[in-house]
Image (cartoon, rainbow, N blue to C red):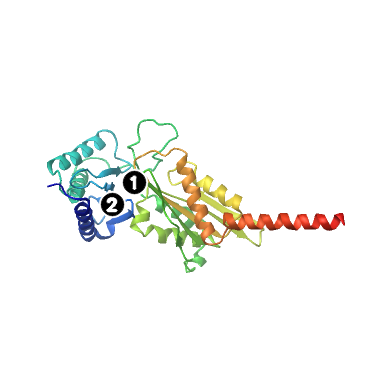
Amino acid sequence: MAASDTERAQQQIDEIEALSSIYGDDWCVVDEDEKIYCIKISDCLDQPKWTLCLQVILPPGYPTAEPPIYQLNAPWLRGQDYTDLANSLEEIYVQNLGESILYLWVEKIREVLVEKAQSSDPEPDIKKTTEEVDEDDGDDFLLDYQPIQEDQIKVLNCMTSESQEDEELPPIHHGNPITDRRSTFQAHLAPVVTTRQVKRVLEKLYESKKIASATHNIYAYRIYCEDKQTFLQDCEDDGETAAGGRLLHLMQILNVHNVLVVVSRWYGGILLGPDRFKHINNCARNVLVEYNYVPSTEESSRQAGKSKKIKKDNKKRTEH
């Protein structure tokens, strides 16, 4: 007898609860509604050399009728390495049709990483690049997972002074996620008045396993310096070419200041093309509106209406 939708949904819930219990902070929920999850897998706990992020989407028919949709994210994983690992996971699925297989997949990946660590393979090149280009070059499976946030923080270290070490961590706000074709985007915002605060906010955000596992964490900030009557501003693409500059440009157009905006993107395996930039900016604008850095569309319309009415009244007075 085929399993019902209710039974499959319960099987998924049971499996996710078990994985969360087994893997703790390494397991994270990207989007509960869309059933998107990811886990960071390493060859060892202490000083891992080889790390990979497995992202899975559970379709309604999993586990009895459909396989999980998966993505393997690592900068070193390409070509034959990718093919061999993908074949191993698909073989596990075929050998366990109808069963919950995510635990088997995770442990198989860990086994491969341990073998790499014990072999003479050189350590992976962790340089991060975008997984999308505007032209489809056929390499849409080449995803990069390896946080480079430490490098970003080192750059900010050069810009901050020792006297600011104890500066207070600003409040951090999180916007509502946007999901499109399995990619999820979420903006985070914090009020900042120094680069030291920018650094502290980034460090705090990257403590989250979910945010650290994002394919990209794009950010931009603008700080107004009263004494110099100028702006201190910067941005970071984090491998998503030109995304940081576009985000900063949006903030300039909106004329916001003393604020840091970070947009996390979890890539879902389908190229979005230019739509990805639209989602990044929409996420950013939404969180800026929500926390009153810019007026909402409705408020802008009302203000424009009032301005037109005042001009019209003034024109009538001058005519009389």
Percent of width and height locating residue 249: 57, 47
Tell whether 297 sits left or right of 85. Answer: right
Percent of width and height locating residue 250: 56, 49
Which residue position is annotated with label 2? 40
Tell whether 213 sits left or right of 106. Answer: right
Q: Quadrant of the C terminus?
A: bottom right
The quadrant holding residue 144 is top left
Q: Is residue 186 above or below residue 167?
A: above
Tell whether 26 sits left or right of 254. Answer: left
Instruction: Tell which residue pokes out farthest to the right in this image.
Output: 320
Foreground of the two, 232 or 104: 104
Q: Is residue 162 above or below residue 135?
A: below
Question: Is residue 219 visible to us here?
Answer: no
The quadrant holding residue 119 is top left
Residue pictured at 76% horizontal, 55% vertical: 311
Assess disc 1: are there few (<14), some (14-19) or many (≥20) residues with their C-alpha within 10 Å of its C-alpha.
many
Per the model, the C-alpha gap separating discs 1 and 2 is: 9 Å
Amino acid type for the residue under numbered disc 1: Tyr
Which residue position is annotated with label 1? 145
Q: Secondary structure at mark 1?
A: loop
Percent of width and height locating residue 296: 57, 57
Foreground of the two, 77 or 63: 63
Assess disc 2: are there few (<14), some (14-19) or many (≥20) residues with their C-alpha within 10 Å of its C-alpha.
many
Q: Mark 2 and mark 1 in contact (Cβ < 8 Å)?
A: yes
Q: Is residue 159 above or below residue 113?
A: below
